[in-house]
Image: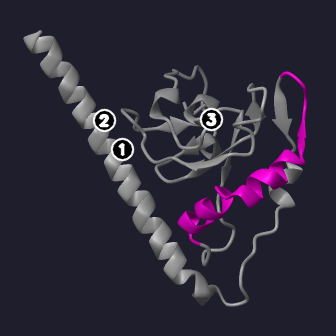
């Protein structure tokens, strides 16, 4: 299960935040997320609102073949097919979206983000979507590169543990 612990305070997706669960009833298919889906944190326990409103694409599913996301998170998908999900992730990870979300936060100890925050955010799109093609391709290429690097790092860490336990 993806949780708010997947969100680093300084930004980025942390695979150590996954929580293993065994659902005792059927989970709606809308609650499943896959590689490169975008999750936005709607709850925050930090005092400085470090996590709330942060958007992170799932860059690594770790050892899990199916990912369910917790109620503290919301999955964001583009409504129009001409909007690249990678471009959407890039826009949502910007300071503009984070600042917008902070205006929709309530609570003192546990912060909650209003559902209106996503609905009322206006994206700065140009009149011609073709202008965005190069940016979308750049975003896709780099998110996939980051994802591959995370997988490689995970394999190397596992190999290190095996070698250390075998020889020391």
What secondary structure predominates along the stretch shown in magenta? Answer: helix
Q: Between marks 1 and 2, how big is the CA–CA gap?
A: 6 Å
Instruction: Give the side of residue 107 with respect to residue 166, left or right.
Output: right
The secondary structure type at the circle numbered 2 is helix
Write the residue at 60% across / 87% down: 131
Write the residue at 8% across / 13% down: 167
Position of residue 53 measured from the top left corner of the image (x, y, whole percent): 74, 45
Q: Is residue 29 visible?
A: yes
User: Where does label 2 land, which residue?
Assistant: 154
Magenta residue check for 99: yes
Bounds of the magenta span?
Answer: 84-109
Position of residue 34 measured from the top left corner of the image (x, y, whole percent): 49, 48
Position of residue 70 measured from the top left corner of the image (x, y, whole percent): 65, 32
Quadrant position of the C terminus in the picture: top left
Q: Between marks 1 and 3, how big is the CA–CA gap?
A: 18 Å
First in residue order: circle 1 vs circle 3: 3
Any mark on residue 37, and which? Answer: none
Any mark on residue 150, and which? Answer: 1
Any mark on residue 9, and which? Answer: 3
Q: Between marks 2 and 3, how big is the CA–CA gap?
A: 21 Å
102 vs 89: above or below: above
Q: Residue pushed farthest left?
A: 167
């Amino acid at each position: 299960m993806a949780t708010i612990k997947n969100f680093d305070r300084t930004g980025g997706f942390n695979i150590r935040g996954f929580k293993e669960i065994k659902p005792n009833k059927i989970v709606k298919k809308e609650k499943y997320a896959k590689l490169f889906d975008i999750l936005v944190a709607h709850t925050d326990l930090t005092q400085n609102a470090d996590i709330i409103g942060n958007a992170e694409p799932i860059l690594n599913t770790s050892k899990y073949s199916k990912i369910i996301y917790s109620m503290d998170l919301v999955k964001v998908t583009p409504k129009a097919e001409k909007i690249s999900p990678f471009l959407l992730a890039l826009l949502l990870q910007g300071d503009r979206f984070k600042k917008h979300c902070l205006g929709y936060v309530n609570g003192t100890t546990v912060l909650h983000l209003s559902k209106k925050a996503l609905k009322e955010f206006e994206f700065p799109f140009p009149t011609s979507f073709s202008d965005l093609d190069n940016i979308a391709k750049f975003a896709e290429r780099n998110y996939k590169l980051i994802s591959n690097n995370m997988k490689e790092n995970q394999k190397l860490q596992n190999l290190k543990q095996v070698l250390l336990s075998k020889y020391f």
